[in-house]
Amino acid sequence: MAKGLRILVVEDNAALARNVVDYLEQHDHQVDYAADGALALDLALRNHYDVVVLDLTLPILDGWQVCRELRAQALRHVPVLMLTARDTLDDKLQGFDAGADDYLTKPFALEEVHVRCKVLSRRHLLNKDVRLTLGDLVIDRKTQQVTREGKPVALHQLSYRILVLLAEAWPGVVTRSELMARLWGDEPPDSDALRSHIYLLRQSLDKPFAKPMLVTVHGVGFKLEQPS
């Protein structure tokens, strides 16, 4: 079975939000929920979502403000699907100008929300460069080959996935909880499992070289640093 998406649903209508969340969860996606714009922005900046489903009429911060702040502050592009009852061309243009990737007007079919989320997540992946380069570290996502200083770095599958997540978030920090969720979904093992994989990654990525790249941010998580 294909791995589900991690989706943030932002909607202040509790009944509608419940319907959307339930439908997406029934299709094996991991869904978080926010009823106001301030919480939505906080969650979107702290977590790694494949798609944000964003209503426009929200308390505290409206959807346009959330989208603009997300584009200004996020270290990666998070696909945004805007949901709204406002269906004029000006409304849509304002949404796209704020940074939305797609726009769906109410009322809508839950199946269409689902399909558009999947399309947005795939489109985002297609726009990624195949090669990630941080200084002398090169990650080829197509072949899953990693080199540092031109030398191959042999990694187990989970160590490779951790490295890619850290490289995509660079120069930001990836929290322990986010790594656990991205690696194991809703059924993470105990924290010792993550500790073991971080140790294995360090053995391959850092030990053979003069300067380490994998840095522990105590009490938070991990990040990559380019050797000076």
Image: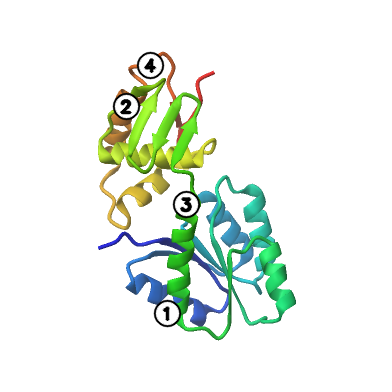
Q: Amino acid at mark 1?
A: Glu
Q: CA distance from mark 4 to mark 3?
A: 30 Å
Q: Residues within 10 Å of mark 3 (few under 14, many from 20)?
A: many
Q: Nearer the viewer, mark 3 or mark 1?
A: 1
What amino acid type is highlighted by mark number 2? Answer: Val
How many other residues sit within 10 Å of disc 2, few (<14), some (14-19) or many (≥20)? many
Mark 3: which amino acid? His
Label 4: element kind: loop
Name the kind of residue labelled 4 in the image.
Answer: Phe
Residue 19 appearing in the image: no
Q: Which residue is mark 1?
A: 111
First in sequence, mark 4 or 3: give its number: 3
Residue designated by label 2: 153
Q: Which residue is at 50% across, 76% downward?
A: 17
- Number of on-image labels: 4
Residue 109 locus on image (x, y percent): 47, 83
Mark 3 or 1 closer to N-term? Answer: 3
Which corner quadrant of the image does residue 194 belong to? Answer: top left
Q: Earlier in the sequence, mark 3 or mark 2?
A: 3
Q: Which residue is mark 3?
A: 48
